[in-house]
Amino acid sequence: MKYIVPPTATTWAPVPEGSHFPIQNLPFCRFEEPELGEIHLGVRIGDQLLSIDSLIEHGFLGEYSDRVFLDIADLANPNEPTALGIGPDLPALPTGLSDLRRQIAELLDADNPELRDNAEATEGTFFDAETAAFEVPTFCSSFVDFYSGIHHASNVGRMFRPTQPPLLPNYRHVPIAYNGKASTVFVSGTGIVRPKGQYLPAGADAPVYGACQELDFELEMGFYISQASVPWQPVQAGEAEEHILGLVLVNDWSARDLQRWEYQPLGPFLSKSFSTSASPYLVTLDALEPFRIQGMPQDPAPLPHLRTTGAHHFDIQLEVLLQTPAMSRPQVISRSNTKHLYWSMAQQIAHLTSNGAPLTSGDLCASGTISGEEEGTFGSLLELTWKGERPLTMKETGETRTFLEDGDRVILTGWGEGQGYRVGFGSVEGVVLPAR
């Protein structure tokens, strides 16, 4: 059962104007309390983190007591057996995050004094988001990266296959993807060490091994899987969203020179596997419900197992900001929107499981680079500088960039714009560190 906080709802907790985290959002996260170093599961409200563990301890979510929750996926699957310390006599709880999010929203409602007027409870329940250290919201079981940004795919085709159609013949028939490396999915703020690998220098006949010279970002949206599926039973597209835990921003860092040398015939490997950054806040589909839209027309019509009805895409505004070491503030270098994705999350899940491969709780799927149709809306430096042929200029310092240099800071952010409020993702960011 979905739970959508009314757009007119207000909270007694302080929320700055324009915040990504009003009561209409309440995204989930895992954070480390700075003084004692304890890991908490929580939600973000305004500039504060509300500890779910503390709410349970103080009896506000009593039905969740006597259970052990290690991450947000555990919260969404509270009836899993003894591996999580659950006794056989405990009552069943609703699966998913909707009911828990409803209870938290009610506690934070402006007219509810239950938590607001309990000084003892509030003192150990709220933490400053600025001083907390974050973990990824759930343990990453596997990582799949799709290629669903049709304008990005078209741009890449124009760059590297200028005499051929921009899109390969299969693009409009199948959600292209590859398996990435789950162990290198890092939370926002983790430094990104410049990778090393083989690449072919310009004009050379043989490759060299060394530090990447063409490091890039990719603007993506990701979603974590909550509910596992049964092996050999494909998930139907119309039921796929039931398996989604929530969404995060993703930066799929890319070594373009390594990629160019290695990607044929089996696709990217070392050029992608060194680092992927994910934002710390897991935004639920319930929170994004007001921003649902129809996707772009799909021609030809997808095969039956990929067909959906209704609105399965979202109107989420996206920005990319870049700050060099010499700059005092970051500069917006691109603005895009998730409406530019050709394949929906439901179609991606249906395709992923169509051969019988199961979903696992904690799987992370990323959308692929989200580019618009015009300059200034592209989701990578590869496109923004058109293979490095049109350098970007930093307005504050006059510096130019074709690809990322050591010390550069990349920030991705995104939000849905409601009437009088925003439902946002915060940001995912990383600073490029020298090769080792």
Image: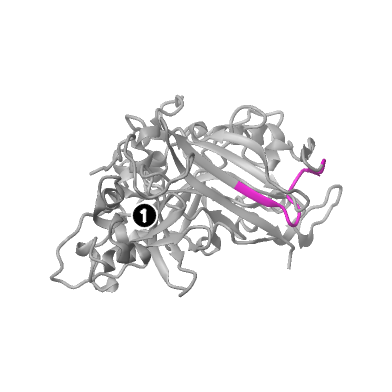
Query: Does 290 sit left or right of 144 as displayed?
Result: left
Viewer-proximal residue among 17 and 435: 17
Segment colored magenta: 398-411
* Magenta stretch prevailing secondary structure: loop
Q: Neighbour class for label 1 at 10 Å: few (<14), some, many (≥20)?
A: many
- Give how far across and how far down residue 390 sits, in percent: 78, 35
- Give how far across and how far down residue 79 sits, in percent: 22, 63
The way the protein has been coloured in the rendering is one colour
- Give how far across and how far down residue 34 sits, in percent: 49, 69
Vertical side of 310 occupied by 210: above or below = below
At x 21% / y 64%, what residue is drawn? 62
Q: Is residue 229 magenta?
A: no
Of the 4 image quadrants, the one containing the N terminus is: top left
Viewer-proximal residue among 149 and 220: 220
Q: Is residue 405 magenta?
A: yes
Viewer-proximal residue among 24 and 347: 24
Residue 69 falls in image quadrant: bottom left
Callout 1: SS: loop
Viewer-proximal residue among 227 and 173: 227
Vertical side of 24 occupied by 277: above or below = below
Residue 264 seen in render: no
**Residue of label 1:** 359
At x 34% / y 35%, what residue is drawn? 7
Query: Does 80 sit left or right of 45 as displayed?
Result: left
Residue 404 seen in render: yes
Q: Amino acid at mark 1?
A: Leu
Query: Looking at the image, how many numbered discs can be counted on the residues?
Result: 1
Of the 4 image quadrants, the one containing the C terminus is: bottom right
- Give how far across and how far down residue 387 sits, in percent: 74, 39
